[in-house]
Image (cartoon, rainbow, N blue to C red):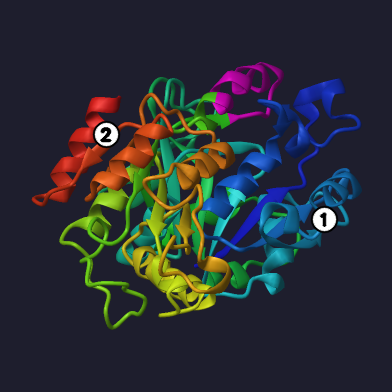
Amino acid sequence: MNEALILAGGLATRLGEASVNVPKCLQLVAGRPFLDHLLWDVSRYGFDRVVLCTGHLHDVVESHVGDGSAFGLEVVYSREPKPLGTGGALALASPLVQGEEVLVLNGDSLIDCNYLDLALSRRSAEADVALALRDVVDVGRFGAVQLDGDAVAAFGEKSLRGEGLASAGAYVASSAWVRSLPQGPSSLEADHFPILVQRGKIAGRGYHGVFVDIGTPDSLVAAQAEVAAWRRKPCAFLDRDGVMNEDRGHVHSASEFRWLPGMPDAIKMLNDAGWLVVVVTNQAGIGRGYYSAQEFKEFTGWVDGELRRVGAHVDATYYCPHHPTAGEGEYLRDCDCRKPAPGMFLRAIDEWQPDLVRSFALGDKASDIEAAEAAGVRGVRYTGGDIVQLVSGLVAGAS
């Protein structure tokens, strides 16, 4: 799954004057249009294509996002000629969906959850749709969702009040189900999800991360601080060879690669906890001519694909191809990125703006720790043992 669809065509009548010239999805939240936060989030999870469903003030939205390249994405548009509701907008956009499943997001809400884990829950339940659920103080505003194991037993019970689970506006759906939706106005929540409940084809999974909804003036105000805090995530900086995988000497192909036991689970644990995961790795094999930068990037893509199979992801990989004595051509030089120099860390910090107080770097060599600490990141030396237990303890100690 590498495709997302965002429903961003609402009229935003509850926002009043604020939405006359600015569509709801572009309301400023924590200094940026709200839609920018959603696009940033799907991009870091490895989604590279977005179908953006527009309607009200569509020209403003489309002018802002363009072709998506500024967000590292390919963005295509489905434009409602008139308000069609969530179900109608999804049905209209269905011919643009290319893969076997798609992440669907409401353009006016955000849930901090592992989208890849949500996809796993759909597949394991053999459901048409899996909902991201969030415990809320009053389910009456959103409609209560009741679970029976992993299956949704009741959806949208607005007569209920008090604490409970509510839909957080994020779904993973099979593309076949999306394409089966009838054309014309309809509501996912009122018309289609209740049918899936009856058929036993809708799953749900609860998450506990930040949940914001900007649909009302009060919630738009509350979202400012909540989203700003959400964007400032702690980060786990991971060395690669010797920490993520066995150090077999300039590993650069699938046949050579061996995960250290438990490492994919440890990365998924970080993803589930809402942490950034960034790889910082010396790759002098490029400079020595053992493999090219392009070959390394393709191999990194393969590693990322293996992680996605278990519901995990790495946000970014930074590498240094240089060597001060054995590099060839342009790669023969001293640099500020080869560990123990902190250049890769400093670049990652500048681009991701993590919460360094809660962050850590995990490396197996003294140079890893020296580079991290020179950049203001706590360094932790990995010398073997249960890496899941180690990472779990580091996350718990940072909370």
Task: Say which of 51 and 192 sits in front.
Answer: 51
| Residue 69 vertical position relative to residue 211 in the rendered view, above or below | below
Q: Is residue 276 left or right of residue 229?
A: left
Q: Residue furthest front?
A: 325
Residue underneath mark 1: 66
Residue 373, picture quadrant? top left
Residue 211: x and y in percent read 50, 31
| Residue 110 vertical position relative to residue 281 in the rendered view, above or below | above
Q: Is residue 219 magenta?
A: yes
Residue 208 shows in the view: no
- At label 1, the amino acid type is Gly
Task: Say which of 170 and 299 sits in front.
Answer: 299
Q: Is residue 91 left or right of residue 157?
A: right
Asked which secondary structure carries label 1, the reply is: loop
Task: Say which of 324 and 159 sits in front.
Answer: 324
Overall secondary structure of the magenta section: helix
Q: Residues within 10 Å of mark 2 (few under 14, many from 20)?
A: many
- At label 2, the amino acid type is Val
Residue 191 shows in the view: yes
Q: At x 66% / y 25%, what residue is drawn?
A: 30
**Between marks 1 and 2 in the image, the one whose residue lies nearer the viewer:** 2
Q: CA distance from mark 1 to mark 2?
A: 38 Å
Marker disc for residue 395: 2
